[in-house]
């Protein structure tokens, strides 16, 4: 298998699906002539033309709504938010229009749409550009929420999201774009199903569930702990709604301990959801309370030192895992 | 042109009578939630329908019964929806504000003011993308014109020259607040900001509505882009059933009913054009029978079901097929969640 970046994996997924289906189009700010604010859409304008790669003005609510209206009437839009932070001015279209339309219409109007863009913290971009929105969008029935942590998952999940007939919130880690990983050749046309977690590392002492930016950090910590004689099983859910509880529970029943590591704030969200599932369905298997390592519960500060303290990092992850082992 | 006017009168009278009976059923406790009546504005939905083709799209707000009826949805399906029944046009899942009819290209009744304007632009985007001749009529009230959704929807439609006509049904009140306190200029004047042609006229004469809208529809169909049309109208009932109407006087309402009732104006004109009272009375009687049948049908229909509710949260899914092994399994937090037959 070849190695490509997470960014190029996404680019390939979009290009392959637009080639396959003429009803797929891409719309967003700077996706065309500018080549994408984060270069995910590089070269697509040249390949598919301005009728299918559509630059918009800064009007998230407007173009998200145009996407939903186009999806209602048979097209398959990919709507890019320059970052998910900006989706807050379009949340009415994602929630009230996309997520509810099928049921409000008793199944008459499907909404095959993908909303995608970079999510969560980057580097010193301040409070309004550092949200991890997974806790918000996972709350709504009618949406799928996908959050790939590797290049391979990014491609296979995005291709699947584009082909599915339901609205998908597709969260891309802003700090993951340049990370490289093995990705199958285009000819393999790999599609990854939703609701299937991936065991990133097998282990026997503690289950660590993680996704997004901290994913790579958790793997580093797991490696270090191995040297100390602690074996971590690392699970990446890949999709947060649906959530593959089965794989997590199976692992916890083996390790008897569980730690959840994520970027979204500690209050509620898929992190707390996993804790709830584990305590309810594996209570008798637990040797210690289920713990979480998360970002600190404050809006993101600018100063590098403070930002570094707020984002869930190596030390907090390691301490939390050790605590679950009473060490 | 008595034939066409007769057909329009028939549609307006159907809307009027369906809604009057809906109001009665609401007071009898058979309809819940919000019920926003269109009474007084019927000439707009019906005249607009006369200006477009069956293959065109219509989208509107929560005041949607009249538009659905004008598009072709049956009185039975509308009444059953209001009653929360499985035979309703949205199978009891949408209710008064969310009528949808894919077969008649009716893209719904939407409950968030301004939210559906970009959806209409999206349907128009589809018409252009697929190089069809279809156009979209997007209706909203004067109360929708200050919100951002209006501005963004019109901006995008204008820069992309989308085949859509934005029709503002200006009934003078944004719920209970008069236009003078919600908008700095007339709605039509806003067209300048989007480089759109505009038109502004009174909407109690169905023939005028149809003829004036034809211009904007033809322009959209020729690929020359959107228009913003402001139609002055008046709702004879409250904003919804719970509106005490303190913001306007009875004299004002009575004066509008006396001078601007679109149904009576059409009926009087038909008589003046030589249509006999006998044949009009016969038509009215047919409508009475249809409405009575719709109410009886709704009352006798089965209630909305968990089965349909669960099956329409997500469409059959390539990405997550196991969820549809039998039926959609809603996310539950305990084993005691209600299902069919038990709450």
Image (spheres, coloured by chain):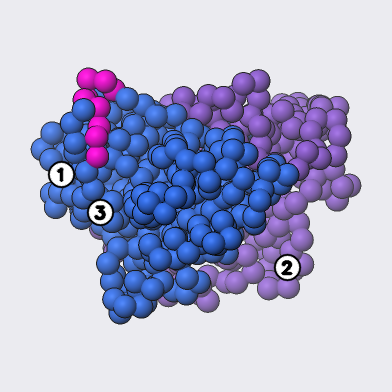
Chain colours: A blue, B purple
Density class for disc 1 (Cα within 10 Å; few <14, some 14-19, many ≥20) is some
> Left or right: where does residue B250 sit relative to residue A296?
right
Please say whether residue B182 is visible from this viewpoint.
Answer: yes
Dot 1 corresponds to which residue? Answer: A42
Q: Which residues are magenta?
A: A181-189
Q: Residue B115, how many percent across, how many down?
A: 48, 53
> Left or right: where does residue A15 sit relative to residue B91?
left
Q: Residue at position x 56%, y 38% from top?
A: A251
Dot 3 corresponds to which residue? Answer: A29
Q: Magenta segment: does it hold A188?
A: yes
Q: Residue at position x 62%, y 45% from top?
A: A256
The dot on residue B245 is: 2
Q: Secondary structure at mark 2?
A: loop
Label 1 chain ID? A
Q: Magenta segment: does it hold A292?
A: no
Q: Residue at position x 65%, y 25% from top?
A: B327
- Between residues B52 and B226, which one lies in front from this camera angle? B226
Q: Secondary structure at mark 1?
A: loop
Gap in Å between the C-alphas at discs 1 and 2? 57 Å
Question: Are callouts 1 and 3 both on one chain?
Answer: yes
Q: Earlier in the sequence, mark 1 or mark 3?
A: 3
Query: Hey, which residue is sitting farthest right in the picture?
Result: B28
Q: Residue B7, how many percent across, how many down?
A: 59, 29
The answer to which quarter of the image holds residue B260 is bottom right
- Between residues B153 and B343, which one lies in front from this camera angle? B343
Q: Residue A56, how many percent across, how many down?
A: 25, 52
Gap in Å between the C-alphas at discs 3 and 2? 45 Å
The answer to which quarter of the image holds residue B89 is top right
């Amino acid at each position: 298998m070849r190695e490509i970046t997470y960014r190029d994996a996404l680019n390939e997924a979009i290009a392959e699906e637009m080639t396959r289906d003429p009803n797929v189009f891409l719309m967003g700010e700077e996706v065309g002539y500018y080549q994408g604010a984060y270069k995910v859409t590089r070269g697509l304008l040249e390949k598919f033309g301005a009728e299918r790669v559509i630059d918009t003005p800064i009007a998230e609510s407007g173009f998200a709504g145009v996407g939903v209206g186009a999806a209602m009437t048979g097209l398959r839009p990919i709507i890019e938010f320059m970052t998910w932070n900006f989706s807050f001015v379009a949340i009415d279209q994602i929630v009230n229009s996309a997520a509810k339309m099928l049921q409000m219409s008793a199944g008459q109007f499907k909404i095959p749409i993908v909303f995608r863009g970079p999510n969560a913290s980057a580097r010193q971009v301040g409070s309004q550009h550092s949200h991890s929105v997974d806790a918000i969008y996972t709350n709504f029935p009618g949406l799928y929420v996908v959050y790939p942590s590797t290049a391979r998952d990014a491609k296979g999940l995005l291709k699947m999201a584009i082909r599915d007939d339901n609205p998908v919130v597709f969260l891309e880690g802003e700090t993951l774009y340049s990370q490289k990983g093995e990705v199958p050749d285009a000819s393999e046309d790999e599609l990854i199903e939703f609701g299937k977690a991936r065991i990133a590392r097998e282990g026997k002492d503690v289950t660590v569930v993680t996704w997004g930016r901290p994913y790579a950090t958790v793997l580093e910590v797991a490696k270090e702990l191995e040297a100390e004689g602690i074996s971590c099983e690392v699970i990446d859910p890949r999709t947060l709604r649906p959530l593959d509880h089965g794989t997590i529970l199976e692992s916890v029943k083996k390790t008897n301990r569980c730690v959840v590591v994520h970027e979204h704030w500690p209050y509620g969200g898929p992190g707390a959801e996993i804790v709830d599932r584990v305590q309810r369905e594996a209570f008798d298997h637990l040797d210690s309370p289920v713990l979480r390592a998360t970002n600190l519960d404050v809006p993101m500060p600018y100063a590098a030192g403070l930002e570094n303290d707020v984002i869930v990092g190596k030390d907090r992850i390691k301490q939390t895992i050790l605590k679950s082992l009473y060490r | 042109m008595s034939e066409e006017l007769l057909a329009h009168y028939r549609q307006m009278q159907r809307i009027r009578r369906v809604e009057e009976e809906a109001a009665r059923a609401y007071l009898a406790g058979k309809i819940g939630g919000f019920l926003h009546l269109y009474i007084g504005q019927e000439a707009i939905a019906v005249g607009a329908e006369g200006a477009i083709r069956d293959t065109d799209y219509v989208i509107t707000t929560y005041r949607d019964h009249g538009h659905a009826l004008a598009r072709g949805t049956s009185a039975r399906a509308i009444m059953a929806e209001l009653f929360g029944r499985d035979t309703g046009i949205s199978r009891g899942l949408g209710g008064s504000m969310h009528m949808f009819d894919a077969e008649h290209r009716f893209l719904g009744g939407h409950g968030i003011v301004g939210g559906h304007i970009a959806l209409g632009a999206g349907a128009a985007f589809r018409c252009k993308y697929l190089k069809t001749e279809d156009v979209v009529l997007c209706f909203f009230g004067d109360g929708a014109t200050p919100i951002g959704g209006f501005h963004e929807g019109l901006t995008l439609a204008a820069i992309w020259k989308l085949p859509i006509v934005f029709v503002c049904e200006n009934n003078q009140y944004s719920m209970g607040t008069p236009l003078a306190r919600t908008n700095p200029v007339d709605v039509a004047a806003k067209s300048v900001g989007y480089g759109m042609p505009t038109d502004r006229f009174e909407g109690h004469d169905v023939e005028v509505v149809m003829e004036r809208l034809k211009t904007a529809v033809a322009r959209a169909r020729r690929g020359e882009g959107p228009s913003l049309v402001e139609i002055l109208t008046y709702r004879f009932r409250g904003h919804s059933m719970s509106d005490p109407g303190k913001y306007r006087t009875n004299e004002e309402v009575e004066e509008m009913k006396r001078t601007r009732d679109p149904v009576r104006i059409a009926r009087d004109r038909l008589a003046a054009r030589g249509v006999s009272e006998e044949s009009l009375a016969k038509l009215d009687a047919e409508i009475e029978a249809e409405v009575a049948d719709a109410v009886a049908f709704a009352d006798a229909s089965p209630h909305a079901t968990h089965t349909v509710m669960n099956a329409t949260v997500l469409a059959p899914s390539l990405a997550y097929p196991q969820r549809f092994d039998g039926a959609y399994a809603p996310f539950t937090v305990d084993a005691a969640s209600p299902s069919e037959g038990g709450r």
